[in-house]
Amino acid sequence: MHLTIGWLYGTKMNIYGDRGNVLALEQRARWRGIPAETREIGLGEPIPDDVDIFFFGGGQDQEQIAVSADLQGEKGEALKAAVEDGAALLAVCGGYQLLGHEYRPHDGPALLGIGLFDLVTEAGSERFIGNIVVESPFGELVGFENHSGLTHLGPGTEPLGRVRVGRGNNGRDGTEGARYKHAVGCYMHGSLLPKNPDFADWLLAAGLSRRQGGTPVELPPLDDDLERAAHAAAVTRAVRTR
Ligand code: GLN
């Protein structure tokens, strides 16, 4: 077994520790004896056809302009086709916003997304900054949010979870993130995966199963004492500070 991670716009869309998600996926595979490699997919570069897991980090409005244009047409369609074929994907904040239909920033025209998730985002007047705790099918998730974007899910779109502490998609409907097949978008920077090992392993197993023709992949457990202690400390801080 071999893991290939496709890091979308790693130099442009990578803030608030998002790179840690790529490191966590690589390391959790290697700790199990699974070779892992990461390929950056930058502006003008095609979507490789052998990626198991895509990661798409956050970025400021300015960076999102060029990335939005780059994703239109063949590239965005190839990314959607990979997800339809079973590839796993994690997108955070600015990356998440561009996987919906569009993101309307404070200034300038709306930025087109690719419509992987049925959602739209508009910049709000308040910036949501702080630790966030979410109840999800992957258990309790903890991260850090920093966005002004207000994301509204389409009628059939499944959220990643419900906000217990923090603001989430829009600070109103109690949802955070979105899910479609093995693709997950959310506002949780942090980085997210090192402190949420069960979710990291779900993404890993989902991505690896693509090469096995969709047959579920069972990953042997790791000693996650440190990761779970970091998770608990982050949840305590979130509850105290918001
Ligand atoms: N520019 C977007 C917003 O502020 C995304 C920011 C981010 O990726 N943290 O909502």
Image: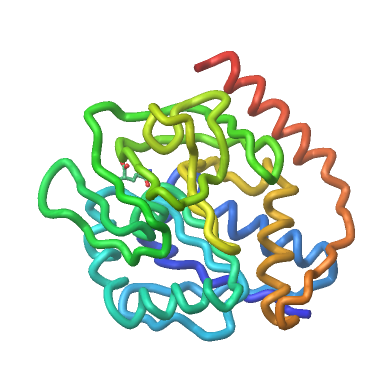
Q: Position of residue 33 (x, y in %)?
A: 84, 71
Q: Position of residue 130 (x, y in %)?
A: 46, 27
Q: Position of residue 214 (x, y in %)?
A: 71, 77
Q: Residue at x 82, y 44 (%)?
A: 224
Question: The N terminus is located in which quarter?
Answer: bottom right
Q: Quadrant of ligand 1?
A: top left
Question: In screen coordinates, is 175 left or right of 60?
Answer: right
Q: Does 225 sit above or below residue 206?
A: above
Q: Residue at x 40, y 66 (%)?
A: 9
Q: Does 149 sit above or below residue 218?
A: above
Towards the viewer: 164 or 143: 164
Question: In screen coordinates, is 116 left or right of 110?
Answer: right
Q: Residue at x 38, y 78 (%)?
A: 77
Furthest residue in direction top, as rendered: 240
Furthest residue in direction front, as rendered: 155
Furthest residue in direction left, as rendered: 108
Q: Residue 148 lies in what quarter of the image?
A: top left
Marker count (numbered): 0
Q: Position of residue 114 (x, y in %)?
A: 33, 66
Q: Residue 79 lies in what quarter of the image?
A: bottom left
Towards the viewer: 87 or 69: 87
Q: Does 70 sit above or below residue 11?
A: below
Question: In screen coordinates, is 86 left or right of 79?
Answer: right
Q: Residue 202 lies in what quarter of the image?
A: bottom right
Furthest residue in direction bottom, as rendered: 49
